[in-house]
Image (cartoon, grey):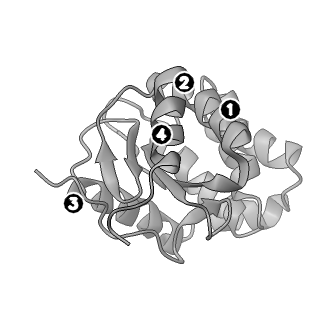
Amino acid sequence: MTTQLIPLVNSNDHVSGEGSAVIEVVEYGDYQCPYCGRAYPIIKSIQERLGPQLRFVFRNFPLSKIHPHAFLAAVATEAAGLQDKFWEMHDIVFENQHSLELSSLYQMADIIGLDRERFSNDIQQQELIEKVEKDFESGIRSGVNGTPTFFINGRKYDGSWEEAELYQYLKNLHAKPSMEE
């Protein structure tokens, strides 16, 4: 089973943090998944604690059969990204994950200051639908079979993502010089 991130982080990804960060965490997530909802504040806290040492990437992995609003929520965050507000939409969607109907997504778009007409057009773009599908396919190729799934510096992380354990793992990783460089 694959444990490598395929493809590696690239210009198609939404990245929070500096390219020079020594720790790169990629999350495959589903906006309607309750476990991803629990992981969201943990990741935010770890981002604050590690600061410039951490670079965070989110890839869409909507489990549409069990989460009927997840795919549209993913497309909506991608549409917000076209207005340079991906992370704002990502955050507000997770903070309101129990209300992801189209009307709620429009309200969230208004709250974060998106151009509503542009957003309305963008969420229907085939290109964004394909971006979400490509994220999902890359997750399958990388061995993702549930959400959230994390990759740390390109390798699948199978440990606990509870805050204390994940933070300690990342901190220890940062303390060790890389053997691969």
Q: Separation of disc 1 and disc 3 at Cα? A: 29 Å
Q: Name the N-terminal-most of marks 1 and 2.
A: 1
Three-letter code for the amino acid on which mark 2 is drawn: Glu
15 or 67, nearer to the observer:
15
Q: Name the N-terminal-most of marks 4 and 3.
A: 3
Do residues under tags 2 and 3 come within 8 Å of each other at their CB atoms?
no
Of circles 1 and 4, which is in front? Answer: 4
Three-letter code for the amino acid on which mark 3 is drawn: Arg
Q: Name the N-terminal-most of marks 1 and 3.
A: 1
The residue under the point 64% across, 41% down is: 102
* Residue sitting farthest toward the left: 1
Residue underneath mark 1: 45
Do residues under tags 1 and 3 come within 8 Å of each other at their CB atoms?
no
Residue underneath mark 4: 172
Three-letter code for the amino acid on which mark 4 is drawn: Asn
Q: Name the N-terminal-most of marks 1 and 4.
A: 1
Image position of 119 (left or right of 60): right
Image position of 174 (left or right of 5): right
Three-letter code for the amino acid on which mark 1 is drawn: Ser
147 or 153, nearer to the observer:
153
For label 3, the SS is helix
Residue underneath mark 3: 141
Q: Separation of disc 1 and disc 4 at Cα? A: 17 Å
